[in-house]
Amino acid sequence: MRRSNFIIPIFTFTIIFVIQITVQQLISQPIMNIKMSRSEFVGYVQDQIVVNFDSITVKNINKTMAGESGRTGIEQLDGLGQQLHVSRLIQRFPDAPIRTYQGKLIDLRGWFTIKFSDVVDVETCCELYRQISGVVDVQPIGIHTVDVVPNDNYFNQQWHLDQVSDHDLDAPEAWDRQTGNPVIIVGVMDTGLRYYHKDLGGATASYNTPLNSRGNMWINTLELNAGIPDGVDNDGNGYVDDWIGWDFVTGVTSGGGYSLISGEDYDIADNNPSDFNGHGTHCAGNVSAINNNGYASSSPAGGWGDGTLQVNANGVKVMALRVGYSMNHFYYGEVGLVRMDFAASAFYYAANNGARIVSCSWGSSNSGGLGAAVDYFLAGGGLVFKAAGNDNNSSADYLCGRSDANIISVAATDQSDLKASFSNYGSWVDISAPGEDILSSYHYHVHPENDYVATMSGTSMATPIAASTAALIWSANPELTADQVRTILFNNSDNIDDLNPSYAGLLGVGRVNAYSPLLDPTLPVELANFTATYDQGEIVLEWETFSEIENLGFEIFRSQSEESNYQVIASYQTHPALMGLGNSTCGKQYQYSDQDISLGFIYSYELYDVAYNGNRTAHGPIFVDLREGKKEHPILTTPVEEFSLSPNFPNPFNPFTRFQFYVPAQQQKDILLQIDIYDTNGRCVKNLIKKSLPSGWHTIIWDGRNNDGFPLPTGCYFYECQAGSYHSQGKMILIR
């Protein structure tokens, strides 16, 4: 178990209601006392509503005219619009593909924002629009408040990761097995985040050079490499220059006891999802602060550095989704708020750009089109982690009250595994996580040039910790489904009902544990590839794991004909090269040569991964056909004498697709094979392979990532294959 004994003193300030916060600048003494409010519904946006029209009405709306003047060309709509002084009517998701969720079609193209030229009674306006033919739904827009041991400086003060009394995540034990995988993207939907904090954005990140942020941040390299800003939607996802996420906040005005704060960004949606409030940065640090980089704090799925600050990190990636902002309340002071229409847009963005998990540490209502956008995200196979709330009652807000299995409501615990005094509870809670006195990254807008850490309390903190733990499970096997990740997370939580008899059954299945899920026998090792190639009298088996594994090892079984049984020919018990205990965070490559073969047979191989508990996971079978001296693939009925590339499968795919190709016998030298992937703008996004290969069948897997290792967004891509005089092209669709 990796440990550190580096301790730095820290100071505590008490703030109103249930939130406690300590802030420490990384280069000086603590300097502030911040006030935050409890979970609550603030009210509705006073000059906007959202409307869902049926498909016929959508086709008949003059969208250009509606966006400019609010007039649609539909008499009944325009009559009401004139009466209510509608200024604009904007289609929210014009290019949204139709998805299916729980047996119903999810079509976001019908959702429009209606803007009025003045303050209106939005609930009355909603009732009037419900009477219009072609209107499916009408909603106001709700505003809610935001609810391995590394050498990182403050790790010893992060009790939730490791403590003597063991009411923690067992993070050091988990890090001995898995530290995080960059293929897993977690959307932090909050007040923005300090993506140039060095514990998130890496060594070159800073307030003065935000474009140099890398680290554990999700980077849209298609936009960044084209030059920021260039004013072009280079990846075709509908957002211009969105190199590190998106700021959805726009058009915020004072009212209801809340006033604007100088320096906060309320004006336009843009490509700068930076934080002002600090809440979002703290949540992001709990998801994927870089581990073992000698700086600040740690996180369950933050990867593992070399002990120093690094430009790039290998933990799960954080997608910056700014849906919240700070305002000044006449009594509470600075408060973080989130609008439901902004959150709806962020769910759509996250679904289309590869996020598998979204962390939501704020109150919610079924308004602003949020419900439909959440359905869209879940239909894509994602998990939503949602804060239970900080009011010490059993009331569930909209998202927590939904029955969807993959919306996970999170309550908070303290250092003794007791329900945190502030945490909501109820039969609707799915799981608990540490949420009291949680130290993580922070942004202090009075001194934006400096990085900070802060200690905060709330279900807002418990939620990203639970999300990060799920991301760690997904890191161990990226081919798991959301249902499987949820099941493994729940089955391996620590039961705390005996410690909380008054809340037994009201804190979910237990408190999250990061270590136990990685021992789950239902968590099989997945391979990046598994190939068999005949070469000069031997069959060479090669495979590679997606990430570091610490199993007992592998066993190889072989069948010599279609009728014969499989028999073990090699085992980790007798072949050291097949031992587990991989030490590469990018996965480990294995190879085994079978020399006990003869021409005239079909050889079939199965590979078994043997877990610590003895459970075996099968991979394969793969075949090599040596009948009559030919090396042909068994699914083919005739010998292959020329290069052959099979279309990628599956197609559409998420997140992996396989190319299978045959290299014919060469008299003089091996053939040079090159496969490149292009986007719809003709840019090469991935050089999949450029290598001389021996004759035989080969398989290569593409994981939907570009040359920099970052996941590409949903879309259409093209592959081009060249091998000698052979040339082939094909189309494939990546769905996130």
Image: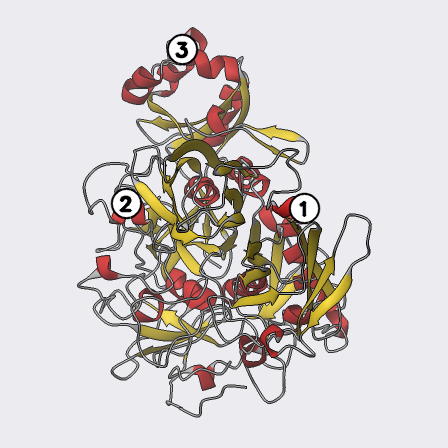
Query: Badge 3 is on which residue?
Result: 79
Image quarter for residue 720? Answer: top left
Q: Earlier in the sequence, mark 3 or mark 2?
A: 3
- Residue 341 vertical placement versus 566 (above, below): above
Q: Residues within 10 Å of mark 1 (few under 14, many from 20)?
A: some
Q: Earlier in the sequence, mark 1 or mark 3?
A: 3
Relative to residue 84, is residue 384 drawn left or right?
A: right
Q: Earlier in the sequence, mark 2 or mark 1?
A: 2
Residue 615 in sight in this render = yes
Query: Badge 1 is on which residue?
Result: 627
**Percent x, y of residue 340:** 46, 42
Relative to residue 78, is residue 444 drawn left or right?
A: left
Judged by depth in the image, the label closer to the viewer, 3 or 2, is 2
Image quarter for residue 320? Answer: bottom left
**Percent x, y of residue 333:** 35, 62
Judged by depth in the image, the label closer to the viewer, 2 or 1, is 1
Judged from the image, the secondary structure of the residue bearing numbered disc 3 is helix
> Label 3 is placed on what type of residue?
Gly
- Colour scheme employed for the rendering of this structure: secondary structure
Of the pair 164 and 300, the residue shown nearer to us: 300
Alpha carbon separation for disc pair 3 and 2: 43 Å
> Label 1 is placed on what type of residue?
Arg
**Percent x, y of residue 381:** 58, 45
Query: Badge 2 is on which residue?
Result: 223
> Label 2 is placed on what type of residue?
Glu
Relative to residue 631, is residue 46 drawn left or right?
A: left
- Position of the N terminus, as image quadrant, is bottom right
Of the pair 610 and 377, the residue shown nearer to us: 610
